[in-house]
Image (cartoon, rainbow, N blue to C red):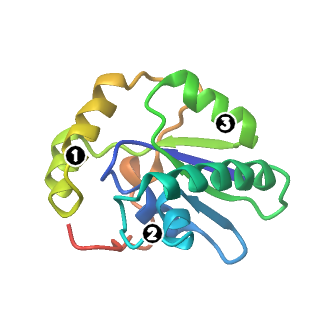
Amino acid sequence: MVTLLCGPPCAGKTTLARNLAQPGEALLDFDDICVELGSTHQWAHPPHIRAQAEHLMRARMRHLRLAAAGGYVIRTAPAAHQRAALAGLLRATRVWVVDPGMQECLRRAHTRPRGTARAIRRWYARYTPSPVDQPCPWVDTPPAQPLSTSRVW
């Protein structure tokens, strides 16, 4: 089963995926791939690494749709057609939009590079609902085990 997690920067997509992923499941995160390719920054990556990471991310997504174990794919994808296309590519069984609200994302952005608040506002300006979206249990129903954050907000 593949779960596509979408949402604005600082929404908690990666934290959610890390808390929910089971052993053997893939977790595809653009920032993790950038670091894997040599970026020394957690979020602000050099253009040449961003280009390589996007290529590798797409290759891993194509591979994941055929994998038996499944996993989680993290993308921002504010537009409905983007999420629908990604869901089709991945054969995703779940598409969750992680959205704690713009004010919460902006509050969390102080730990991120310059431009993050602008990216958050841009995501909300571009966001459109999609028929493929499903309620995110992290937002709508707390999990049995409390989720822990990967960083201090």
Q: What amino acid type should be assigned to the residue bearing mark 3? A: Ala
- Give the total of numbered labels: 3
Q: Which residue is mark 1?
A: 115
Secondary structure found at label 1: loop
Q: What amino acid type should be assigned to the residue bearing mark 2? A: Ser
Q: Is 13 rendered above or below residue 82?
A: below
Q: Earlier in the sequence, mark 2 or mark 1?
A: 2
* Badge 2: residue crowd in 10 Å (few <14, some 14–19, many ≥20): some
Q: Residue at x 84, y 61 (%)?
A: 68
Q: Which mark is residue 87?
A: 3
Camera-nearest label, 2 or 1: 2
* Badge 3: residue crowd in 10 Å (few <14, some 14–19, many ≥20): many
Secondary structure found at label 2: loop
Whether tag 2 and tag 3 are in contact, CB under 8 A, the answer is no
The reply to whether residue 60 is visible in this rendering is: yes
Q: Which residue is mark 2?
A: 39
Q: Nearer the viewer, residue 23 or 10?
A: 10
Where is residue 106? Give x, y as percent.
17, 47
Where is residue 58? Give x, y as percent.
68, 47
Q: Residue at x 64, y 36 (%)?
A: 86
Where is residue 74? Give x, y as percent.
53, 51
| Distance between mark 2 and mark 1 Cα atoms | 18 Å
* Badge 1: residue crowd in 10 Å (few <14, some 14–19, many ≥20): few
